[in-house]
Amino acid sequence: MGNAEPFWADSVGYIIYPSTFKDSNGDGVGDIPGIISKLDYLAELGVNLLWICPLFASPMDDNGYDVSDYYQINPQYGTNEDFKNLVEQAHQRGIRIIIDFVLNHTSDEHPWFQKALQDPSSKERGYYFFRKGKKEGDKLLPPNNWKGFFSTSAWKQVEGTDDFYLHIFSEKMPDVDWSNPELRQRYYEIARHYLDMGVDGFRLDALAHLAKDTSFADSPLPVDEKGFAYDPSRFSNREELYGYLDEFKREVLSHYPCLTVGEVGGGVSPEEALRYCDRENGSINMVFNFDTAWCNGAYGSIDKKQEDIRTDVIAMKDSLERWWRVCHQKADMPFYWCNHDHPRVLSQYGSVEYRAESAKALLAAGLFLYGTPFIYNGEEIGMSNVNFSKPEEFFSDVGNKNETGYLRARGYSDEQIVAYLNRCSRINARTPMQWDNVDYAGFSSVPPKTDPVNPNYKEGVNVQQQMSDPWSILNFAQYAILKRREPWVSDLIRNGTFTIVDHNHPDVLSYMHEKGDDKLILIASMRPYVTYFSFYWMPKDVILHNYGDVLLIDHVFTLRPFECFLLAI
Ligand code: GLC
């Protein structure tokens, strides 16, 4: 690969959810020394870039996305010294670290917000959005009808006053006002602090929402029973945001060799993405969208039955193709199937019944797509969703807790809500990492304080057992990552052409990379039944395959459940 390539051209990323990754001190919560103790494991797996979800001081209303002190590591995770040590130790193993930078909101316990509450004439008051409520008769209503992401009004009244503050997530997470130049400088100082310490960049949380429609007019969209309209356009991808990001780049990011990946969520088209991360003029390096996370209609599927949830493989291919066509050679792209906000991909697109086959097919399909791939912790051993029986079991996620209240008020039974949350909840991805076939899956020596361990760790879904099984998901993942990082493969995937093969095949995800004489083709059945796939090339090498024999007769592959190949042709 050329010298001019950025480090992420050759990176395989790994996402760590710190509270449930590894507990080193027996308090039932994951911590930084726990992560350090697993760096050798990660190096051996072959990943070389970590995105670690927030580690800062926080009352943990939204599991760390509610930051009360950006300069202090959350004591439950360790000390600032532990964090420096983690960065150093990772670097010694050739692993870079990007941290989760939450800059759309703080915790309501952050000193800025406390000051803003106590002293309406303080400069901190101008860091947030405070507005008067609307008087209707003797009732005081929120300033407008906006609904936030966590199923409530986006406003919370300040006790004993007519004032409300804006929070598009939980009420303990007041939004900060990026139009305030001083506020922006406070965030730049924080960014410099971590970059100077040696951190390699940021995953920029909820980035799309930094600019709001400051007319704060009501949304014209239909309202729910409580009079609230869910209209993210009022606080997503708005024009002013791009100016803030240009300044962030000019003042901070351009002075460091760092990677920035912005979370832009579900509403961004590839064309809009270029405004963020065009290689020439963009302010950041890549954006995470949600398009590949919900290709089965499960999102918001409270009214659906399980049998209605089916991966739309053609729509998935359309979307993959479209992002490539618009962004190739113009912007870098990341890829993930799953993160801490989504259900486990094995349950989403794969199958618990065909755990090994589907986990391997999804790993291969994700790793060899275009862009910088990110694996979510546990994906490398085929971890899957929970199977809870009460909505309350999901309440460590404030989003699920609020949504349950909202759904109950609309008349849904607990049975319906549980079926829905078992399918869609973020808790699915947040149960402890399964390290071993011992108590609490080797995550901790005591019962986890967060969410319980998935009992399937006793059925081989754990690192220790898979390490000693040559055909395990883990060994497949390790080999696939090794191959993905071979220089000719990284170069081919980054700089060659990408084509979807057999676009209209309803069951198979298949694509090809081509550059000069180098050609790679990936074929992955996304179904738990047999399907057929026409194949017109002469394989030179079978690089990856998840079955013991090959059924190829007269140019047609018989693909068994979730059978996948990576072939050099
Ligand atoms: C992002 C995070 C999510 C969090 C939200 C609010 O979407 O990924 O976990 O709840 O922002 O910070």
Image (tube, rainbow, N blue to C red):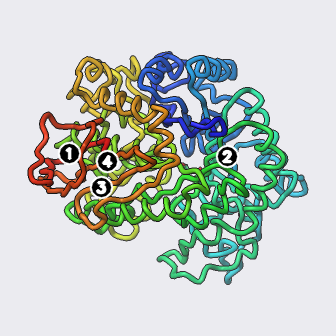
Badges 1 and 2: C-beta atoms under 8 Å apart? Answer: no
What residue is shown with label 3?
509
Locate residue 57: give its quadrant: top right
Instruction: Report the Cα–Cα distance between label 3 and label 2.
Output: 42 Å
Q: Is residue 84 above or below residue 557?
A: above
Q: Mark 2 points at which residue?
A: 107
The answer to whether mark 4 is within 8 Å of ligand 1 is no
Q: Residue at x 74, y 26 (%)?
A: 197
1 or 2: mark nearer the eye: 1
**What residue is shown with label 1?**
563
Question: Mark 4–mark 3 contact, CB under 8 Å?
Answer: yes
Indicate the secondary structure of the residue bearing disc 4. strand
Q: Residues within 10 Å of mark 4 (few under 14, many from 20)?
A: many
Earlier sequence position, callout 4 versus callout 3:
3
Q: How far apart are marks 1 and 2 (CA)?
A: 46 Å
- Circles 1, 3 touching at the beta carbon (< 8 Å): no
Please name the residue shown 48% across and 39% down the image. 490
User: What amino acid is labelled 4 in the image?
Assistant: Leu
Amino acid on which disc 1 is placed: Glu
Left/right of residue 559 with respect to residue 316 in the rendered view: left
Residue 425: image location, x then y, percent: 39, 51
Q: In the picture, residue 213 is in which quadrant?
A: bottom right
What residue does disc 4 label? 522
Looking at the picture, how far across and down is residue 552, in whole percent? 12, 47
Q: Label 1 to label 4, Cα distance in Å?
A: 11 Å
Q: Judge the density around disc 3: few (<14), some (14-19), many (≥20) Cα neighbours within 10 Å.
A: many
The image position of residue 355, as x and y in percent, is: 22, 39
Q: What residue type is labelled 2?
A: Ser
Q: Which of the marked residues, 1 or 2, is nearer the chain's N terminus? A: 2
Say what secondary structure mark 3 lies in: strand
